[in-house]
Image: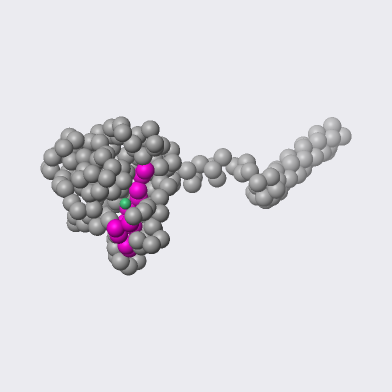
Amino acid sequence: MSKKTLVGFLLILSAALVIIWISRSEVKKKNIFPETIRSSTKNNGQSPNPMAEKLPQAEIVTEKFFLPPLSRASERVTKKYFGLFVTPKNSPVQPENFSGYHTGTDFEVFPSEENADVSVKAVCSGNILMKKTATGYGGVLVESCELSGEPITIIYGHLKLTSINFNVGDKISAGDTLGILGRGYSTETSGERKHLHLGFHKGRAINILGYVQNKSELAGWLDPCQSICTD
Ligand SMILES: [Zn+2]
């Protein structure tokens, strides 16, 4: 072997060794990298990983599928939320005619709306199943819908019956104006204050009870705020 060949051979050998050394340190770096992400997440309190923030949001979008029936919906839930146990003595609304677990969510009107027409919109697309005057509600409308693939019925309570634009059997779309809220302390609201009672009852059966007497019955209902109180 000539001197030239030997030098060339050594050069190739050292280049190969350098390549092997570099690729081994790259593998090491990859192994360390996830640890670096985790510790920096802990330290600054803000996730540097955009996927970590996107995934939970995507889940929320599928749950909060419905539209709010009134503007600024979440600001209006100030008296009776879903599942609240009321009695004539402890109720946030006085005088109180009912007792039991509240099966829906009450959306109050703002002071400026007391004497104005307040439009109520459909929270989902579906069919009108019932439209009538009922004790405790005044005008009440029931709509069939699906939430996350499951059938539910929507109860809109305390509407002015004669303002309702649809009849039983009609198909409606999410966001359609259903009618307006009944006038407070009149037959339009069955003597109740002006507000919207919104109930989500599981399944296809019509049940317009505003209160139930035990928690096992309450399990037949869903909290409307989980799907619409996002604004
Ligand atoms: Zn209510």
| Spot occupied by residue 169 in the image (x, y as percentages of width and height) | 12, 42
**Left or right of residue 7: residue 153:** left
Q: Nearer the viewer, residue 31 or 231?
A: 231
Q: Is residue 182 visible?
A: yes
Q: Is residue 141 visible?
A: no
The range drawn in magenta is: 96-108
Q: Which residue is pictured at 37% across the width and 43% down the height?
A: 108
Instruction: Give the colour scheme shown.
Output: one colour
The quadrant of the image that shows the N terminus is top right
Q: Nearer the viewer, residue 131 or 64?
A: 131
Based on the picture, tell me whether residue 98 belongs to the magenta stretch: yes
| Spot occupied by residue 48 in the image (x, y as percentages of width and height) | 62, 41
Q: Quadrant of residue 229?
A: top left
| Spot occupied by residue 164 in the image (x, y as percentages of width and height) | 18, 37
Q: Which residue is pictured at 47% across the width and 43% down the height?
A: 57
Whether residue 211 is situated above or below residue 30 in the rendered picture: below
Q: Which residue is pictured at 38% across the width and 33% down the height?
A: 112
Whether residue 29 is situated above or below residue 216 in the rendered picture: above
Residue that sits furthest to the right in the current view: 3
Based on the picture, tell me whether residue 13 belongs to the magenta stretch: no
| Spot occupied by residue 155 in the image (x, y as percentages of width and height) | 25, 49
Whether residue 194 is situated above or below residue 104 in the rendered picture: above
The quadrant of the image that shows the C terminus is top left
Q: Which residue is pictured at 67% across the width and 50% down the height?
A: 42
Q: Main secondary structure of the magenta part?
A: strand
Q: Quadrant of residue 205?
A: bottom left
Number of marks in the rendered image: 0
